[in-house]
Image (spheres, helix red, strand yellow):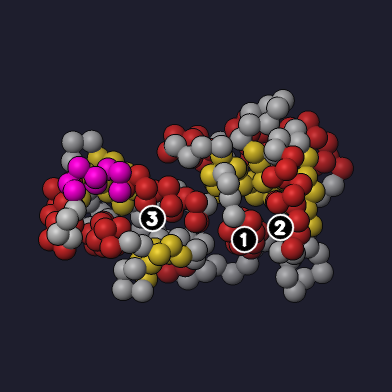
Amino acid sequence: MIEGKGGKTPIGVVVADHDTRLREEELLPGLAAHGFEVVGVGSAAALYRSLVGDRYDLVVLGADLPDESGLAVARHLRRHSSLGIAMLLELHPPRGHAEALQAGVDLCFAKPVETETLALSLHNLAARLGGTPARSRGELDWSLKADGWQLASPGQRALALSMPERIILKRLFATHHAPVPRAALLADLLATLDEFDPTSLERLVHRLRRRVLQRTGLPLPLEVIRGTGYMLVLDEAQ
């Protein structure tokens, strides 16, 4: 069914979320405006019924459905289908993202999600599932652009960075093959920012992770190395 823009058949999407206002007033009309053939349901049972009767390509899945957890639904769909799965999380702790990805979810978004961001991410996911030509390495990797003032995700969603975020990410990208000590990051920050508070580093990293997820739908591959500092984990095989 996947063809989308320029093709004869639109991309079919089922939105399964218990929040009727979000589903019916925001997500369904917003995704339809971006060219998707979209249907909304409010429960896991209704989702399963819709998948039996019709052919869809993607599922936008709420984490808290009234009759079954979103994680359980995602695991079932991953075992028994080739659907692309995006999950809407009520909160955005790193554990929630990790559990969703382990369950087979392709994309994670923290509520409230911007419809445009969701639509663009779903188009990218559908393109990958549809067997479109592989993108270049630069499009598959996380990267810094605009002299380090923008972070680009594998889906090419760009996030504008603040000066402290730019300083941190430039060091992490330069040494992504090894952990960066906390002291080294603080030295970089204090060398450039006269009034930087060293105790705010963890809050700065937490805020950066949250902004990246909200903007791109993907968790920043930044690991905390206990007793040392931070490490950016990039897939060099790509």
The secondary structure type at the circle numbered 2 is helix
The secondary structure type at the circle numbered 1 is helix
| Amino acid carrying mark 2 in the image | Gly
Q: Which residue: 20% across, 42% down? A: 199
As drawn, which residue projects farthest toward the top?
67
The secondary structure type at the circle numbered 3 is loop
Query: Residue under circle 3?
Result: 235
Residue 89, image quadrant: top right
Query: Residue under circle 1?
Result: 116
| Amino acid carrying mark 1 in the image | Glu
The mark that comes first in sequence, 1 or 2, is: 2
- Report if the CB atoms under discs 3 and 2 are less than 8 Å apart: no
Observer-side mark, 3 or 2, equals: 2
Q: Residues within 10 Å of mark 3 (few under 14, many from 20)?
A: few
Nearest the viewer among 228 and 109 is 109
Q: Residues within 10 Å of mark 2 (few under 14, many from 20)?
A: some
Magenta stretch in the rendered image: 197-204
Could you tell whether 65 is left or right of 237 in the image?
Answer: right
Q: Which residue: 42% across, 47% down? A: 210
Nearest the viewer among 132 and 179 is 179
Task: Give the alpha-carbon distance from disc 1 to disc 3, as whole Å.
Answer: 27 Å
Q: Which mark is residue 30?
A: 2
Q: Position of residue 72 (x, y in %)?
A: 63, 30
Could you tell whether 231 is left or right of 50 in the image?
Answer: left
- Report if the CB atoms under discs 1 and 2 are less than 8 Å apart: yes
Observer-side mark, 1 or 3, equals: 1
Q: Is residue 37 above or below residue 59?
A: below
Q: Which mark is residue 215?
A: none
